[in-house]
Every structure is written in structure tokens, then in C-alpha cells.
Amino acid sequence: MRVSLRFCTFAATAVLAAACSTPPAPPPKPVEDHTVQVPPNAGVYKVGQPYQIDNVWYYPREQPDYDETGVASWYGPTFYGKHTANGEMYDGNQLTAAHKTLPMPVNVRVTNLDNGKSLIVRVNDRGPYARGRIIDLSKRAAELLDVVQTGTARVRVTYLGRADINGAPPPITPPAIASALPAAPSGKVDTAALGIVPGATVAPPPAKSAQMPTAAIPSQMFADDQPTGKVTRVPVPVVTHLYVQLGAFSKLENAKALLNRVGGDLRISTLQRGGQTLYRVRSGPLSSVADADAALSRITGGGANDAHIVVDQ
């Protein structure tokens, strides 16, 4: 009996010693989370400094009278989850867009001139940088305007006003901008054309007269009070054409000088606006975006860096 008890005590001691010498199992590693949670409207109001892309300079600025026609494109999954130019997060399911020079964020109305569908989108990014494109739409905006299947569309883009930031409307003049604005001059101001940066071509600020849509597409057709996020239909011309426009001038001799300098298949057409005759130097009409792209490439290759694609009848 003593022998058995002594043996049991020894066995129990050995088992306990073995248990104490075995290290405990390490705790499981926490699952790493690489996602970044950024509210969709967490950006800032931004005009931006001049910048250069593909040897072309762009000049962002306030443009409350912006109203242009041209060709729209759209961008998709490659940019999902990336920050936009004003610090927001790109989401292809939101009604947003990219523009080369408008401040951000602002609301603009984009109207598909092929089908009359019109939609308000939020500009919060920079682009597109393919020559001849006026605006880059998010996938959802492109779907609602029927741009996804075709890839591009003839559109009109009209500035409506500044967009909300973090759910609150921005002040009319943000304090940071107001404090940086110089006092308005009281006397006569002399102006001069901006010189070309050495070794680079320049995309100059568009002149209002050169960029405003023609009388063939009346502004009354595009109401500013249509609701955000809802597609509406507006009447548009039955047939539109594309033109490559190099400039619009109030003096005929200036238009002739540009035409003679560039040459090629250009012509001068007139437009009556605000009691003034404008002389437009342009190539066209062109029936397809491909034809307009080819014409734009030829014209810019000849040194006319101000050329752009517009939509007209």
C-alpha cells in the first residue's frame, strides 16, 4: 500500500513538472485592416495653383460664368478608393466629375446633347487630360447620361455654384480666400497676354466670348433649379456637329490673322451675342468624335494650342 501510494505521488509530480515546462500557445494574431475610412465629403474648397500635364499648363480659377460645350468622357474602377484633387475619396457610384480648371467642389449641370438627359454632378477632381475632352464623369453619372456604352458624348457643362463641404454649404467667399485677395484697384488696369512658359505649350484661360455656347443651343433650355441627383430631359437640337475652334474675336482682322497663320481647312463664321458680332475661327463641321479628335490633333500639331472641340449645329 505504501509502495503504491509512493508511486502515485511520483507519477503525479512528474506530470505536473511536464505541464509546467510546456510554454503556453501564442495568442492568435489580430486580423490586419488596411481599409481607410474617409467621409465622401471630407475635402476642402480649393481653386489650386497653375500646373503642368504632358507639357501643357493649366490655370485653375473662379469661373462663375462657365458655360461650355464639348465632349465628355468617364473614368472607372482604376480610381476607386483614391483621393481626389481636393482631398475627397473617389467613389464611382457617386455623381461626381473631374475638370481641368474649375474650383472644387462645385456643382455643374451636364447635359447630353445627343439625348437631352441632364444631370447635376459634383466636380471634385482634376482631368481629363486627353485633348478635346471637356469633363470626366464618374461611372454612375455616365450611366445616367447614357455615356458608358459609347465612351464619350457631346455635352454642355454649366456652372451652378459651390457644392457642400462635410454636409454644410460653404460661405460665399471662404475666409482663407478672402484674406488672400488683394484690394481691388481703383484706377484703370492694363492687361497683357500671359507669355508661354519656355519649353511648354499653354492651355490659356478661355475667353468668355470664345467659350459660350452658340445661339443654336439656347441657355433657356437649361434650368438651374432642377434637383440634384435626378435625371431630367431638356429639348436639344435634333442634329449637332463638332467643330475644332481656335478662337473667337470681336475684330475681324484678328480672326483673319489667326486663320492666315494656321492655314489648313479653317473658316471664319459669325455669331451675334449681346449686340456684338463675334468672328470665330474653326474647322468643321465634323460628324464624329473620331473625326474631331483627328482634326484637333492636326491643328494643335501646327502650333494652335488654344484649339478645342465645341458642339454646334
Image (cartoon, rainbow, N blue to C red):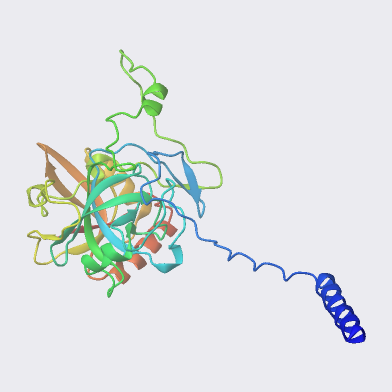
The quadrant in which the C terminus is found is bottom left
- The x, y position of residue 72, in whole percent, is 29, 61
- The x, y position of residue 215, in whole percent, is 11, 50
The quadrant in which the N terminus is found is bottom right
- The x, y position of residue 56, in whole percent, is 47, 50
Residue at the farthest front position? 1
Q: Is residue 108 left or right of residue 53?
A: left
Query: Which residue is rendered at x = 19% and y = 64% of the image?
Result: 241
Quarter of the image where one finds residue 142: bottom left
In the rendered image, the vertical position of residue 276 relative to residue 6, given as above or below: above
Q: Is residue 58 left or right of residue 118?
A: right
Query: Which residue is rendered at x = 26% and y = 71% of the image?
Result: 288
**Residue 265 visible here:** no
In the rendered image, the vertical position of residue 184 relative to residue 140, given as above or below: above
Residue at the farthest top position? 186
Query: Which residue is rendered at x = 25% and y = 38% of the image?
Result: 64
Relative depth, front residue between 132 and 25: 25
Q: How many numbered discs?
A: 0
Quarter of the image where one finds residue 137: bottom left
- The x, y position of residue 47, in whole percent, is 39, 38
**Residue 282 visible here:** yes
Quarter of the image where one finds residue 193: top left
Query: Which residue is rendered at x = 27% and y = 75% of the image?
Result: 149
Relative depth, front residue between 281 and 195: 195
Relative depth, front residue between 209 and 71: 71
In the rendered image, the vertical position of residue 40 relative to residue 28, given as above or below: above
